[in-house]
Image: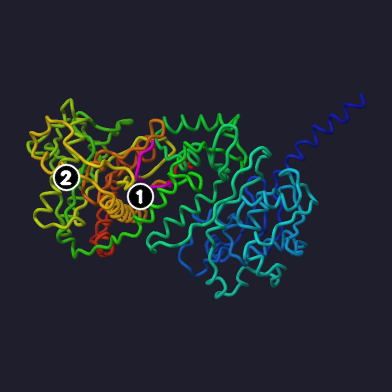
Amino acid sequence: MSLRPAFLWLLFAIPLLAQAASNPASVKLDDTSKACLSSSLGAYLEVRVEKASDLNLTCRLYTGYFQKKGFNLKKLKIKKTSKTRARVPYLALSPAFKRVFLKKMWPKDKLVGKNWHHRVKYPHETLWTISQMYTGFGNNYSKIRKRSGLPNDRVKKGMLLKIPENLLMELIRVQPDLTLAKLEDPVFATQAQLDEEQIMVEETTPVVSEPAVNSEIKPQEPEKRVEKKVPKETQAQLDALVASRQELRWGSDNQGAYAEYRLKAGEAIYTSVVVRFCGLVEAADVRRVAAEIIKRNRIVDETDMAIGTPIRIPQDFLEPEFKAPGDEQFEAYLANLKAVGRIDTRLLANNLVGVHIILDAGHGGADPGTYHKRVWEDDYVYDIICRIKRRLESQSAAKVITTVFDPSIKYQVQDVNRFRLDRDEILMTRPPFKLDSRRVTTDGVNLRWMMANNRYKELRTKGVLAENVVFASFHADALTPKLRGSMIYIPDARAYPRSVEIPNRKLRIYQEARGNSFKFGPKTMREAQARSMAFAKNYVERSRSNGIRVHNHKPIRTQIYKNRYKPFVPAVLRFNRIPTRLLIEVCNLNNKEDQTLLRRPDFRQSVADSFVEAVYQTYGIPANKSGKPGTKVIARRSKSEP
């Protein structure tokens, strides 16, 4: 009988304890905000204003973007919870407000000798979040644990932690007492102070919660930032690469070498690990590799993992840019990135005089391409190239050459939501190749790059500059359903055939066989990658400006990864000798929202406009002076999308 009251007390107390653990710790910062710390969301500032119109302005002030361009809620991970409320991650705050945040939450913390003394005050604190708040990197948690003499990663209320002074962020080292004037209202800060402050690259990683304990693993330390010894136009790529790699730790265990990544809020293994770090995008490949990673990490339920869960990715699964420092493939990737970045790709062509654009619509005839729920690839992308052709020829001096022709509609733009599936398309070879042939997926594919090379040779013979020829092949992808948007493939200077010959003797009956026996060299390939990358960046920029979604992770790629991770370059790029060449996947037909968009004529026009504006931008003509803009389409975010 004496056990019954105790049992009933436990039934009553457990929910209360769970609720206490889930409720965030909070301290009022000023009349508009309060500093918060929770197990699921990490450290953040909860902002509340009276008028909805004031919310963006207030968030600008807290993040240091009061009068500067570049303020972006999505980029800064700011979450609007209502019309008048928002959560601003601690790492998105300006240095001034970071100092205030720490002072309000832990007023007794101070610098003692060469260590910052931090007293654990809240149940939501973990070594990982403490490390992020004070050093800018969660990966420094192991150094804090070692300096504090802790036997494991667990921390308890009242525990004294010692943070090495050399790890502290500059904002703390400059003002170790964290003393600022009393805050009455967000507008207390001076305009000059906010104008000078920027969010550091090292501080943009979202907060995650406590890492799991595994004393057997001794991963390598986070790698150091790559030195800036390349031209300015390449530095952005290097900075992005460094930022991504700083989220990884490399090590090995009894299952082999790995890179460890810790999940952030809202992330899943499929898109945030496999797609991002392994380069896989096709549904079957993503599922297969995700299953292997889940098995390796002994994950019971991949749909229910805590923030900060360490995910070890086998070294063999990683793309070259994410392999361990010193790895041969990583070093080759880095060397190629720098070499390509040194090539000057600036061009100038008034009204596109002398510029020739070769447009290829993927598939056709007996091969409709990706087909999903009454939407297929070939007719829809053919309509896009018709729109590009119409605008370029009506507004500029550019010459347009197409590889595919549909005799039933010619080059007429179709403002319809549904097309009639037919098989009458032909390749514009000499003689024409009917795409209803049984060899459409072999000879039809080879004839496309042969035709591109033949036309390129003819243009060069007429005196057209190599850099004034652009080749673009348009497609619609079939990827893992959660991915959305456009992806662009360009040639890779590290992967190319040393020489090219006609693949089939039967194809010698076509005039396109001429000009298709040649050799590639490293210098030629580096220039091709540089020019193609420059154009692809312009296309991505114009797409975003026109409301066209592009892939979140790496929208520009040089290789396709599938079939047990052996990368390859599409034939239409691999054997193509035109310096500026691209394969554009306009959307993912396995995604419901993308599929709906492709049906819409205004979406197809916006894709065409983005490409045309990228042409203008590539040849030194500002996009806002490139003619009448097309209709913009805002691609809404899917609820299921990461």
Apparent side of residue 550 relative to residue 89 in the rendered image (left or right): left
Placement of 184 over or under 540, stated as above or below: below
Quarter where residue 446 is shown = top left
Distance Cα–Cα, label 2 vs label 1: 31 Å
- Main SS of the magenta part reads loop
Residue at (45% x, 66% y) in the render: 69
Q: Amino acid at mark 1?
A: Ile
Percent across and percent down for residue 531 are 28, 55
What's the mark number on residue 548? 1
At which x and y percent is residue 468? Answer: 19, 57
Quadrant of res 408: top left
Magenta segment: does it hold 408? no
- x%, y% of residue 508? 10, 34
Q: Nearer the viewer, mark 2 or mark 1?
A: 2
Mark 2: few/some/many CA within 10 Å (<14, 14-19, 20+): many
Asked whether, in this view, residue 504 is left or right of residue 136, the answer is: left
* Residue 197 vs residue 4, the one in the foreground: 197
Element under disc 2:
helix
Pointer 2 or 1: first along the chain: 2
Q: Circle 2 is placed at which residue position? A: 453
Amino acid type of the residue tagged 2 in the rendering: Asn
Toward the top, the furthest residue is 1
Disc 1 crowd, CA 10 A, few/some/many (<14, 14-19, 20+): many
Q: Tag 1's secondary structure?
A: loop
Magenta span: 552-561
Residue in the foreground of this view, choosing between 619 and 260: 260
